Structure formats: C-alpha cells, structure tokens
C-alpha cells in the first residue's frame, strides 16, 4: 500500500516513515501542499496522512484538493493538541 505523509515538520515525517515503511507499506513524504498534490495525482496513494504543511496551503485546503485530485485516497488528518498551563 502506498502512503503519502504531508507535514512541515521533518521530525514528524521521519517518525511516520519509520513507523509505516516496510512490510506492506511504502511511504512517500512531502512538506509542501503543491508537491503533495502533484504526487497524489500521479501515484494515487491508498492513504494520505495530512498534518501541518509548509506555507502555501493549510491542512484543510490540502484535504479538499486531495479529494478532487485523488478521490480514492483515504485521508487521516493529524491534529496538534497540547496541555494547558497548570494541567497534567
């Protein structure tokens, strides 16, 4: 299965690659929404994992465009969450 991972953070992409690549998965990574859309149109990945892409687009906009360019691709959206000060 071909997986496309998109995020501005190289560490996030590296972690996703290490976790998923091998076995039945091949992983491609992109930091730019533009490159991700070009890749998806050409290769039709089975799954796209979308985090926070670099300037030039946002995750929600990229997901909308992916649905048009590659409607067969399943999409998982990564969402950042943090702890509020004073909580554990």
Image: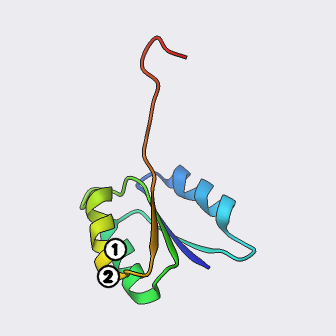
* Image point (42%, 54%), residue name: 51
Which residue is situated farthest in the top direction here?
A: 86
Task: Quote the CA–CA distance across marks 2 and 1.
Answer: 5 Å
| Contact, mark 2 vs mark 1 (Cβ under 8 Å) | yes
Residue 69 is tagged as: 2
- Does 45 appear above or below 51? below
Q: Secondary structure at mark 2?
A: helix
* Image point (53%, 52%), residue name: 12
**Picture quadrant where residue 33 is located:** bottom left
- Does 82 appear above or below 24? above
Q: Nearer the viewer, residue 2 or 7?
A: 2
Q: Secondary structure at mark 1?
A: helix
- Does 58 appear above or below 34? above
* Image point (45%, 30%), residue name: 82
Q: Could you tell me which quadrant the C terminus lies in?
A: top right
* Image point (38%, 72%), residue name: 36
Q: Nearer the viewer, residue 71 or 28?
A: 71
Q: Nearer the viewer, residue 59 or 53?
A: 59
Residue to which mark 1 is pinned: 66
Residue 13 is tagged as: none
Residue 65: % across, % down: 28, 72
Residue 69: % across, % down: 32, 82
Which residue is situated farthest in the right direction here?
A: 23
Residue count near mark 1 (Cα–Cα under 10 Å), binned few <14, some 14–19, many ≥20 = many
Residue 2: % across, % down: 57, 78
């Amino acid at each position: 299965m071909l997986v496309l991972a998109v995020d501005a953070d190289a560490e996030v992409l590296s972690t996703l690659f290490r976790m998923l690549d091998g076995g039945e998965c091949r992983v491609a990574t992109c930091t730019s929404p533009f490159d991700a859309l070009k890749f998806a149109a050409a290769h039709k990945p089975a799954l796209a994992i979308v985090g926070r892409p670099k300037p030039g687009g946002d995750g929600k906009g990229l997901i909308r465009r992916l649905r048009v360019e590659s409607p067969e691709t399943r999409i998982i959206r990564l969402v950042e969450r943090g702890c509020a000060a004073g909580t554990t």
